[in-house]
Amino acid sequence: MVKFGIMISVVIPLYNEERTILKCLKAFEEQIFRGPFEIIIVNNNSTDSSVFIVKKFIKNSALDIKLLKERSQGIVFARQKGFLSAQYPIIGTTDADSVISPTWLERIEKNMRDRRIIACGGKNFYEKKRIPTFISSNFQKAHFRIGLSFLFGNNMAIRKKAFLDIGGFDLSYKRLEDLYISITVKRQYHYKNEVPILHDPLMNIDTSLRKYRHPIKFAKMLPIIFRNYFKVLCKSKPHLATPSKG
């Protein structure tokens, strides 16, 4: 009889990523991790051929993949739906425009074998370009140095029990839902004998710079990002959030 250790659910929000979703999914076929894992793709009202590509991939793949629908628009709603639908005790999450490294699931398993670890995350490479990767990496490291954990939503994992204990995502955060979870977990377990959040530099992904190539759209996002950034740093109590039905 084969005895499995860590079991992992991976949540992938999906919104109009027809150019990248196939590469994202194929990376899971290349994982060296041999334990049970499921992939939960949450379609967030895609209007391109993303869903068609996913359905075709599911039909021809041996991977355990579920395709869900979230009607409320926004990545925080999609992540919330996927996290609450996860059947395994560890939830990893990435984005449809990201490609995980072959050891990504293995790193999550290794980290979560330490029961003191509540959540973990790694390093993002931005299309293997040095400057964006350098900025992102040092921004994240700076937060850890001053005691503010910051896990990226496209490259993190958390225990489902802890996620439920803190009330899930705060659905009022249209951006930086990942920072909200990071800071809330750190605060929730700060006074306990825990090492709540681990930064693992070997837990790598390669992700797209597409969001930053449209200066007007990015400029419109900045006020929301800054407002949510300071809002989450000042917030002390978890907010119970429920996903929409459907």
Image (cartoon, helix red, strand yellow):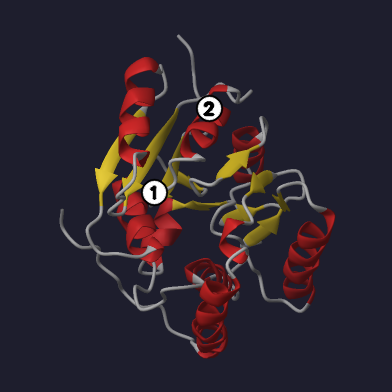
* Number of on-image labels: 2
Disc sitting over residue 155 in the figure: none
Q: Is residue 117 visible?
A: no
Residue at (54, 29) in percent of width and height = 28
User: Does residue 141 lie above or below 122 as drawn?
Assistant: below
Residue 232, image x and y in percent?
A: 52, 83
Q: Secondary structure at mark 2?
A: helix
Left or right: where does residue 115 sit relative to residue 47?
right
Given residues 176 and 143, the one toward you in this image is: 176
**For the residue marked with disc 2, what is the amino acid?**
Lys
Label 2, label 1: how far apart the Cα atoms are: 15 Å
Q: Secondary structure at mark 1?
A: strand
Residue 105, image x and y in percent?
A: 59, 35
Q: Quarter-wise, where is residue 212 in the image?
A: bottom right
User: Does residue 184 lie above or below 51 as drawn?
Assistant: below
Given residues 79 and 84, the one toward you in this image is: 79
Q: Which residue is mark 1?
A: 14
**For the residue marked with disc 1, what is the amino acid?**
Leu
Left or right: where does residue 220 sit relative to residue 131?
left
Q: Quarter-wise, where is residue 76 in the image?
A: bottom left
Q: Which residue sits furthest left?
A: 246
Q: Which residue is mark 2?
A: 26
Left or right: where does residue 214 sit relative to residue 81?
right
Given residues 155 and 194, the one toward you in this image is: 155
Instruction: Mark 2 or mark 1: name the one nearer the start of the chain.
Output: 1
Residue 9, image x and y in percent?
A: 43, 40
Residue at (26, 43) in percent of width and height = 68
Q: Which residue sits furthest top?
A: 1
Other residues around mark 2 within 10 Å, as few (<14) / some (14–19) / many (≥20): some
Asked whether the beta carbons under mark 2 and mark 1 sit within 8 Å of each other, the answer is: no
Q: Quarter-wise, where is residue 80 in the image?
A: bottom left
